[in-house]
Image (cartoon, rainbow, N blue to C red):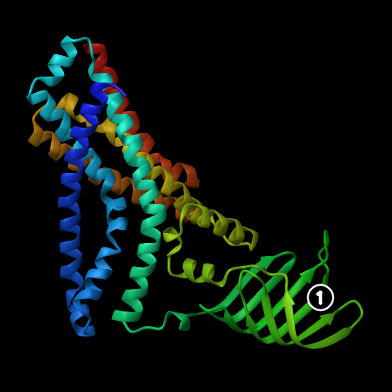
Amino acid sequence: MSLLFRYVFMRHARLLLLIMGLGVGIYLLTDIVERVDVFMEAGSSVGLVLQYFGIRLPSIIAQILPAVFLLATVVTLCLMGHSRELTALHAGGISFATVACILVMCGVFWGGVQFCCSQFLAVQGERYAQQIWQEEVKKKDLSERTINDVWFMENGWTVSVTKLRADGEGTGFSAFHVKDGGSDVDVIVRAPRVKGSESGWVLAQAVRLYPDTYKREELARLELPLHQDPELFFSTESNNLQQLPLWQLGDAIRQLGEAGSNVDGLRTVWHGKISYAASLVVMALLGAAIVSRFSNVYIAVAVSMAGTFIMYSLTMFGESLGQRGVLPPFMAAWGPDALLLLIAVLRLYVVSVRR
């Protein structure tokens, strides 16, 4: 690790942490103002309020880190330019591109921090915060959530449940099994009550019919080889699948895809988790491109904030198009990063040619 790398990394990290603290403070202040009335009406204690916002910190950090990284990059380069450090480096044979490459390595490091934070700490924190908000503040019992008319396919079974609760309890169960490689139904199962879980779906007072032989069986308990997680249906219903970590979301996409659901939107979210962490590398090059054009720190910060707004807008727009099926999931998730990367690289290339 070179002396220059350590110097740039540490200087950039100090500014990043400072800006991060300011950003988190503003975010929390806005959130507290919006929710304080609800906490007061619910009679929540100060400890519960602090716990709620404390466990949301990893999610907030993961959300604002790309914007914070861009601002830290721009301020670092502007300060180095103002103190003639960039000029001294250039005179010593170290080009601006070398400094930009160091910032790219910083982007890789902080991108890894963002990814780990969003896929580990933030996931658990948001789940616990949602539980506190719904059960402790809103006084709702999450286990009583229900969905009507649930359909899915698994292991040759086409399953229908009239009403399904979040705890896996359901009513009005019916299923049809199709023979391997054919289209004929060989087994029909009906039951007034069912308990679903990833380990298997258990039916109570089930009736099993064999259309080929007209045989009928009545069973007090019947377990079918179904491993669909009922919580996935509620995650899809409440748009909470984006809160799943990357590997669990991948499993959910596979299961829902096998069940016949349209998973283009979920694939867009899956790619978006990776592209959002990778955007910090793009922000490193974008920050260098901005400073190469605007050396004044105030102008550069204003332009970087506009770039942040554009990045978030493009990300939301691409995600919307991907979920609607207008764009392929990969293109919808990675398009904003690719566009900003192209602009930054072209600008840096023009600067290098001129120099």
Q: Residue at x 43, y 79 (%)?
A: 142
The reply to whether residue 289 is visible in this rendering is no
Disc 1, SS: strand
**Rendered location of residue 332, percent (x, y):** 43, 45
Q: Is residue 249 above or below residue 239?
A: above
The reply to whether residue 348 is visible in this rendering is yes
Q: Residue at x 69, y 65 (%)?
A: 154
Q: Nearer the viewer, residue 42 or 8?
A: 8
Q: Nearer the viewer, residue 241 or 84?
A: 84
Q: As drawn, is 93 to the left or to the right of 328?
A: left
**Rendered location of residue 52, percent (x, y):** 27, 69
Q: Is residue 309 above or below residue 4?
A: below
**Rendered location of residue 240, percent (x, y):** 43, 65
Q: Nearer the viewer, residue 301 or 202?
A: 202
Among the 4 quarters of the image, the one containing residue 91: top left
Q: Residue at x 43, y 69 (%)?
A: 238
Q: Which three-letter amino acid code belongs to the residue tagged 1?
A: Val
Q: Quadrant of the C terminus?
A: top left
Q: Quadrant of the N terminus?
A: top left
Which residue in the protein does label 1 denote? 187
Among the 4 quarters of the image, the one containing residue 172: bottom right
Count the marks: 1
Q: Residue at x 20, y 55 (%)?
A: 24
